[in-house]
Image (spheres, rainbow, N blue to C red):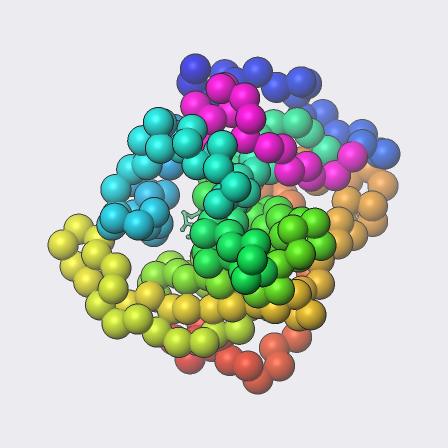
């Protein structure tokens, strides 16, 4: 099924009182197919690595991931609308150590930019509260500015660099390493959803870019220094 034709419960026509963004488990074949299409695009998979380098994740691999306790995969919707627009995930979850070894996200529908941090924030709340995790690690490629901004908005702490660790088109890039403790996590509120009555926030491109900026506190994610 093509991504743009996937069944949605209703079209995006926001009304006051509609529920905010939702995270939806990846438990239906059409959702897994859609996520697989997004993960099959070079613009997305070139920033990811599921253990054996940069390449598209196969549909079969994604189906297996969706069934394993090692991962929590969620689609997220646009605000006030059931349209899936991206995927967020915790991977390498070790319940006995209360850790998740990696956090990743893909905005499948690029016109809905700006909502990923809020979706990841909800996922982190699930990880810290429901799964009892105490630390979540993340990495991103140095030149992936959008991803670094998302981590920064979530309060992730920059903890180091792996040099020449990520290969795109035959060229090496550094990976930047981050982590976040349960005690440092503050869920990004849906404040702008409840804020302005009558303002369409589901409209692509018109959503505020950052829902809750955190003052920079000197921990210095390297975006500042780039
Ligand atoms: C990373 C990703 C999920 C972010 O989604 P998003 O937050 O909805 O996307 P945005 O386009 O709003 O980018 C996030 C921030 O980066 C900023 N940004 C994006 N590209 C930028 C650039 N080239 N230079 C400067 N800032 C940039 C945006 O302005 C935004 O910042 P703001 O919130 O302060 O306005 C999305 O870009 C994506 O799917 N990328 C491909 C897959 C990927 O890289 N995943 C992350 C690896 S784990």
* Furthest-bottom residue in this view: 218
The image shows residue 148 at horizontal and vertical percentages of 46, 63
Q: Is residue 200 visible?
A: no
The image shows residue 165 at horizontal and vertical percentages of 25, 64
Residue appearing at x 57%, y 65% in the figure:
135
Q: Quadrant of the C terminus?
A: bottom left
* Furthest-front residue in this view: 96
Of residues 71 and 214, the one nearer the viewer is 71
Residue appearing at x 83%, y 49% in the figure:
195
Q: Compared to 103, does 14 lie above or below? A: above
> In the visual, does 99 lie left or right of 124?
left
The image shows residue 126 at horizontal and vertical percentages of 67, 49
Confirm whether the magenta stretch covers residue 27.
yes
Q: Compared to 36, does 7 lie above or below? A: above
Residue appearing at x 75%, y 30% in the figure:
14
Residue appearing at x 82%, y 37% in the figure:
198
Q: Is residue 195 visible?
A: yes
The segment highlighted magenta reads: 19-35
């Amino acid at each position: 099924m093509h991504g743009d034709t996937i069944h949605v419960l209703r079209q995006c026509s926001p009304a006051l009182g509609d529920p905010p963004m939702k995270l939806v488990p990846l438990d239906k074949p059409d959702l897994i197919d859609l996520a697989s299409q997004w993960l099959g695009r070079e613009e997305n998979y070139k920033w990811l690595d599921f253990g054996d380098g940069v390449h598209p994740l196969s549909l079969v691999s994604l189906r297996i991931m969706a069934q394993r306790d090692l991962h929590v995969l969620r689609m997220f919707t646009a605000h006030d609308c059931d349209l899936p627009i991206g995927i967020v995930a915790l991977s390498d979850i070790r319940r006995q150590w209360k850790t998740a070894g990696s956090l990743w996200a893909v905005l499948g529908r690029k016109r809905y930019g700006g909502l990923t941090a809020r979706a990841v924030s909800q996922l982190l709340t699930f990880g810290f509260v429901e799964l009892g995790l105490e630390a979540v690690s993340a990495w991103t490629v140095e030149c992936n500015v959008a991803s670094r901004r998302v981590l920064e908005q979530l309060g992730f702490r920059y903890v180091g660099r792996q040099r020449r660790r990520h290969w795109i088109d035959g060229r090496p890039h550094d990976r930047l390493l981050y982590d976040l403790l349960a005690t440092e996590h503050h869920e990004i509120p849906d404040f702008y959803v409840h804020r302005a009555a009558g303002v369409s926030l589901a409209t692509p491109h018109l959503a505020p870019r950052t829902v809750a900026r955190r003052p920079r506190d000197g921990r210095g994610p390297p975006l500042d220094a780039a």
